[in-house]
Amino acid sequence: MSEYIRAREVYKSFQIGGGTVEVLKGVDLSIEKGEFAAIVGPSGVGKSTLLHLLGALDRPTAGDILYEDVSLAGLDNGRLAAFRNQTVGFIFQFHHLLPEFTALENVMMPLLVARRKRSEAQEIAASLLREVGLEHRLEHRPPELSGGEQQRVAIARALAVGPKVILADEPTGNLDTKTGEAAYELLRRLNRERGLTFIMVTHNEGLARRCDRIIPMLDGRIAERT
Ligand SMILES: Nc1ncnc2c1ncn2[C@@H]1O[C@H](COP(=O)(O)OP(=O)(O)O)[C@@H](O)[C@H]1O
Ligand SMILES: [Mg+2]
């Protein structure tokens, strides 16, 4: 495997109420292409903040993130957004599906935003929902789906524009053990079959142990340097 993503001396602080909160204090991290990595650590340590920076949703206060030879610090806001839209898929603990739209429409949404033709978007979305085992739920709205099904719609949506890396923030955190296990197995299959790189934040030690690598965070840094 070869290095795909590198965080280099990444710092992140937030200005809040006249003070500064230092969250990330020099994160160095290297992720290989096709790797399935787990980020673990206590609540408030900066896991979600790091995931946002890795996914180009936000910028570091200092330091840089590189995707192969692309430096995110070197991209202006427009290019950064374009890079994110083409490269990264996000899955969250609370799926953030649009409740008034069907499963099919939810998965079509990023494709329509990317200006794909409606018929094309529909075809891709239906095929992705089939891939995650929801071919019988295309017309259901999120409130009519179980928690596990909702998360599978969110997984299909994350895949819609053909990302190379999936960033998942506690994707099983809101699911019972068995359903969470099934969601993990689905992500693993996508990792294997599509060669996608995964970075997953999780509190589930059992799942973390089954990933290719555990990246422990402590006090705004990676506890063991990688
Ligand atoms: N947008 C923000 N503004 C101010 N503080 C923030 C912001 N985002 C995160 N933080 C703070 O950064 C710290 C780490 O948050 P987070 O990355 O969500 O931790 P974790 O995901 O490890 O639980 C917390 O103390 C949180 O309050
Ligand atoms: Mg978090």
Image: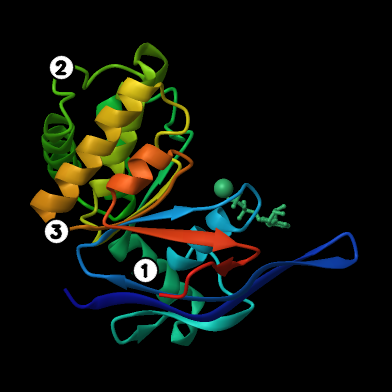
Amino acid type for the residue under numbered disc 1: Ala
For this view, does 103 lie left or right of residue 200? left
For marks 3 and 1, the one nearer the N-term is 1
Residue picked out by circle 1? 82
Q: Could you tell me which quadrant the N terminus lies in?
A: bottom left
The answer to which quarter of the image holds residue 212 is bottom left
For marks 2 and 3, the one nearer the N-term is 2
- Describe the element under mark 1 as helix, strand or loop: helix
For marks 1 and 2, the one nearer the N-term is 1
Disc 1 or disc 2, which is closer to the eye?
Answer: 2
Disc 3 or disc 1, which is closer to the eye?
Answer: 3
Please name the residue shown 34% across and 51% down the image.
113
Disc 1 vs disc 2: Cβ atoms closer than 8 Å?
no
Alpha-carbon span between mark 3 and mark 1: 22 Å
Residue picked out by circle 2? 136
Visible in this render: residue 105? no
Residue picked out by circle 3? 195
Label 2 neighbourhood size at 10 Å, few (<14), some (14-19), many (20+)? Answer: few
